[in-house]
Image (cartoon, rainbow, N blue to C red):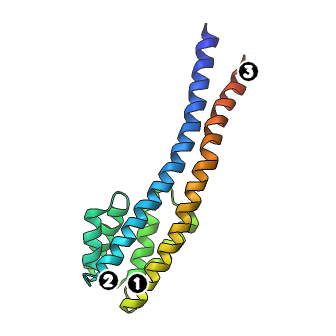
Amino acid sequence: MLKIVGSILILCCSAGLGMAGSQDLKKHCMELRILKQAVYMLRGEIKYSKAPLPEAFGALAARVASPFGEFFLNLERELGLQDGRSLSQLWREGVKQELRTTCLSREEKERLQQLGEGLGYLDLEMQLSTIQLYLEQLDGDIARAQEEIRTKQKLYRSLGVAGGIFLVILLV
């Protein structure tokens, strides 16, 4: 009786691990979409309302989902301090600190840091061009994430269940 209960628990736990891996893929894609939406909003704030960056970041912080809302709120706060650090330094630090818990890959975070280096000191057209280039790169990242969901989601679930069955056989 104890072996049956243990076997069921092992199967449930391994299936849960497979499901968790599958959910991480979905979360990654969702975070990329939220980031894309935030960058579109930033482009609109710069292009149409001609808002200074601290104001644009403040407006974004109120409208963008977590964790990117906190990222922009922190940028607005840090720029208000005027402690001599440049926007690119604050952006880089914000990506490292505020976005460390996201599912973004290292390459995606590096590209986001590069976006921050192009903001603040370039003229309006160059800033908009930098944002447009980043949006195009982000579209590629989203397409790759969606393809990864299609190919790996079933794999993770199947491996979780198969691994559980293997452990049950091995232990029984």
Q: Categorize mark 3 by other alpha carbons within 10 Å: few (<14), some (14-19), many (20+).
A: few
Seen from the viewer's position, the closer of residues 48 and 10 is 48
Check disc 1 and report its element: helix, strand or loop.
helix
CA separation, marks 2 and 3?
A: 62 Å
Q: What residue type is labelled 3?
A: Ile
Tell me which numbered mark, 2 or 3, is placed earlier along the sequence.
Answer: 2
CB under 8 Å between callouts 2 and 3?
Answer: no
Q: Which residue corresponds to the image point at 60% horizontal and 53% vertical from the top-left?
A: 148
Q: In this view, does 101 lie to the left or right of 166?
A: left
Check disc 3 and report its element: helix, strand or loop.
helix
The nearer-to-camera label among 2 and 3 is 2
Q: In which quarter of the image is the N terminus?
A: top right
Which of the 4 image quarters holds residue 44? bottom left
Q: In this view, does 83 lie to the left or right of 136?
A: left
Task: Give the image location of residue 74, x and y in percent.
Answer: 32, 68
Q: Categorize mark 2 by other alpha carbons within 10 Å: few (<14), some (14-19), many (20+).
A: some
Which of the 4 image quarters holds residue 64? bottom left
Task: Give the image location of residue 55, x and y in percent.
Answer: 24, 77
Q: Which residue corresponds to the image point at 52% horizontal and 48% vertical from the top-left?
A: 24
Q: Categorize mark 1 by other alpha carbons within 10 Å: few (<14), some (14-19), many (20+).
A: some
Q: Is residue 118 visible?
A: no
Tell me which numbered mark, 1 or 2, is placed earlier along the sequence.
Answer: 2
Q: In this view, does 144 lie above or below 131?
A: above
Q: Which residue corresponds to the image point at 32% horizontal and 83% vertical from the top-left?
A: 47
The nearer-to-camera label among 1 and 3 is 1
Residue receiving disc 2: 47
Residue receiving disc 1: 128
Residue receiving disc 3: 169
Q: What residue type is labelled 2?
A: Lys
